[in-house]
Amino acid sequence: RYNSVFLDINYRTENPHMVSLISDLIYDGKLCPNLDSEYYKVPKGMRKKLFPGNSIEIIDTSDITDPHTRMETEINSTYYNLTEAMLSIKKVLDLLDEGAELNNICIITPYKAHAEKIKELFLTHSKYFTENNQGLGQFINKNIYTIDSFQGREQDIVIINWVRSNYGLPGSPTKTGFLRDFRRVNVALSRAKKRLILVGDFETLTQSDNMRARYIFSKLKTIKEEEKIVL
């Protein structure tokens, strides 16, 4: 029998704004940023530029009025979401326009079918990546993962596609599959070093048939309205 030890310092995520988010969502506020990270080594005047307060972005597909447009597709007991995949390609292009490097971006998702769909769509839309053509093939092969296969890894900018988008009778719970395991959600949220972008149907996610998942995604949905104080 082994004793479990809670590691209360996050050594992966360099941006303390994101550490604060993970701490509140998963660890009841007990997780602390690493005071030896790059954030605390740079002069205070440079921190806002290198580690912006808006380091967590929510792209909520439930803002799309027609639920059929944003809905998941099931294939061989796994799922993909065409809308989320296309929004992710657009987001990568936006990040490149902002000066990000393609090899510093990755996309993760709970479902293998969705990861394969994203790869397929990047190839289909490769003409929009003419300035990064040589790096696009490597990006497709090395920077698109399922959440489970991304364990132990990290990246400067992480885009998460949650995929699930389904509706039953009014007021009835939605199906969120893998996301019922909050440990998978924790793995996904804690992979980004500097910036985290969440793409999903938060109307579905906040009505999950699992109460822990429902709580986590309800908190995430309100993130734009909450300001975290970071010293």
Image (cartoon, grey):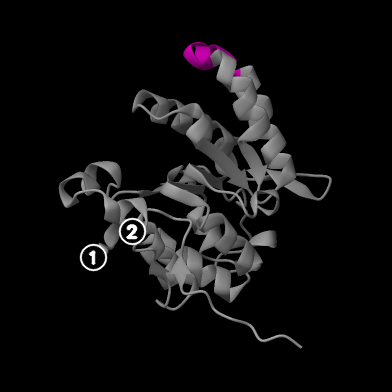
Circle 1: is it few (<14), some (14-19), or many (20+) Cα within 10 Å?
A: few
What is the x, y in percent for residue 175? Answer: 66, 62
Q: Is residue 23 magenta?
A: no
Query: Residue at label 2?
Result: 17
The kind of residue tagged 2 is His
The kind of residue tagged 1 is Ile
Highlighted range, magenta: 125-132
What is the x, y in percent for residue 1? Answer: 76, 88
Query: Residue at label 1?
Result: 229
| Residue 128 in view (yes/no) | no
User: Residue pushed farthest left?
Assistant: 45
Label 2, secondary structure: give it.
helix
What is the x, y in percent for residue 91? Answer: 45, 33
Q: Is 22 on the left-hand or right-hand side of 191? A: left
Circle 2: is it few (<14), some (14-19), or many (20+) Cα within 10 Å?
A: many
Q: Image point 58% across, 15% down: which residue? A: 134
Q: Is 19 on the left-hand or right-hand side of 82? A: left
Magenta stretch: dominant secondary structure:
helix
Q: Is 177 on the left-hand or right-hand side of 40? A: right
What is the x, y in percent for residue 216? Answer: 49, 68
Q: Is 42 rendered above or below residue 128?
A: below
Label 1, secondary structure: give it.
loop
Q: Image point 51% across, 16% down: which residue? A: 132
Q: Is 37 rendered above or below residue 20?
A: above
| Residue 165 in view (yes/no) | yes
Q: Image point 40% across, 62% down: which residue? A: 19
